Image (spheres, rainbow, N blue to C red):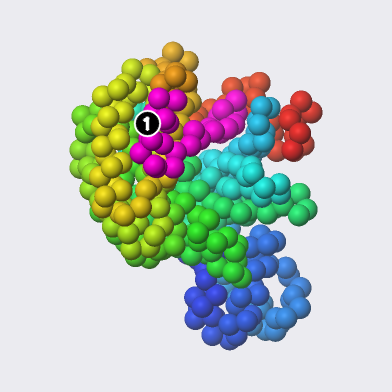
Amino acid sequence: MPELSLLELLPDELARLRPDLTPAEARRMLAIAQREGALPAVTPVGLRRGPYLAAREALGVQHLEPILRAESRVDPFVKLALRAPDGEVIETVQIPLERAGRVAVCVSSQVGCGLACRFCGTGQLGLRRNLRAWEIVEQVRRVRESLPAGARVHGVLFQGMGEPLANLRAVVRAIRVLSEPSSVSVSARNITVCSVGIASALPELMRELPLVRLGLSLGSALPATRRALIPLEEHHPLERSLELLADHARATRNAPLLAYLLLAGVNDDDAQLAALSALLGRFVARAGLPPRVSLLRYNPVEAGGRFEPASDERLQAFRAAIGGLGIPVVRRYSGGADVGAACGQLGQALSPPLRNPVGPAPAAGPER
């Protein structure tokens, strides 16, 4: 695999690598690579033939090969399976947004995941490898090229396969490319990096990308319960990550997103709610502003698994209590469960009846 891909370069980097290109030509080349996924043999308008052909020869545009497109039959979520040059399979999800014609892309940062969160199907796979920055950017490009005319990618979520903070350098580079106006041009404020909390990596992420929204999966506010669900708690306590997020929020006025997955009989009782309320109170006192809280229902990843979704009554009790603290709280919809696209399901094999090869959407699908 080539050392460098045009899909992971910024214009000033390309101009330094190829000094015969002007900054304007570097921006033009990267825009073409991102839009077309390739550099044409014929020199495009606005580029000088000699420098363009030399750069085209020296630098490649690698691809992820689409091998599966699975459209949910119950909502407008779409999962793509993409094969990397080494044969590894990467999954990404196209998420519909409220405003017509806008979508978000849930991208993966690793193949599998090494953190072994008990409630996550991807975590059961183990870690195969980190993704390169271009492989992250290519996921967004593949979604974008499949959109109908007039539609666009409005946001990116690092919430797919893998722990973004465990692949920090590639994630930071990918976000810089994604938010570069001459490349993908997604506002950094519309990019969210979701983590279970590697506290040692958070300061660098905050320093390098201060405008990016941060998300944290809580699991439980009680350390013993959280350790049972998220083994990382042993070495990276939730309280430390929340302190870092609170200080960042105070400095930037950019509220983080805190996600709480409710599991029946595990983290949904009144003692868990009281601990969560106290934790949120400490955050507000330190940050000077409330976080945004998302409550999620569990998406089963195997038949007869060890977890069950909490009841609607318990979810509503959590929502009412947190809202009563003056903290914005929503019940987040996690779509695409029928095609293995919902939170925690990526990387799991789809059952044969739901497998849709790349091509037209199934006739029975919902209106888009």
Nearer-the-camera pick, 167 or 309? 309
How many neighbours does mark 1 have within 10 angstroms: few (below 14), some (14-19), or many (20 or more)? some
Measured as percent of width and height from the top left, residue 343 is found at: 49, 34
Q: Is residue 58 above or below residue 351?
A: below
Measured as percent of width and height from the top left, residue 327 is found at: 39, 42
Determine the image quadrant of residue 43.
bottom right
- Indicate whether residue 257 is drawn in magenta: no
What residue does disc 1 label? 321
Q: Which residue is drawn at 21% across and 29% down?
A: 224
Nearer-the-camera pick, 21 or 227? 227
Tell me which segment is drawn in magenta: 316-343
Nearer-the-camera pick, 167 or 233? 233
- Indicate whether residue 317 is drawn in magenta: yes
Measured as percent of width and height from the top left, residue 293 is found at: 41, 40
How many numbered marks are there?
1
Determine the image quadrant of residue 6.
bottom right
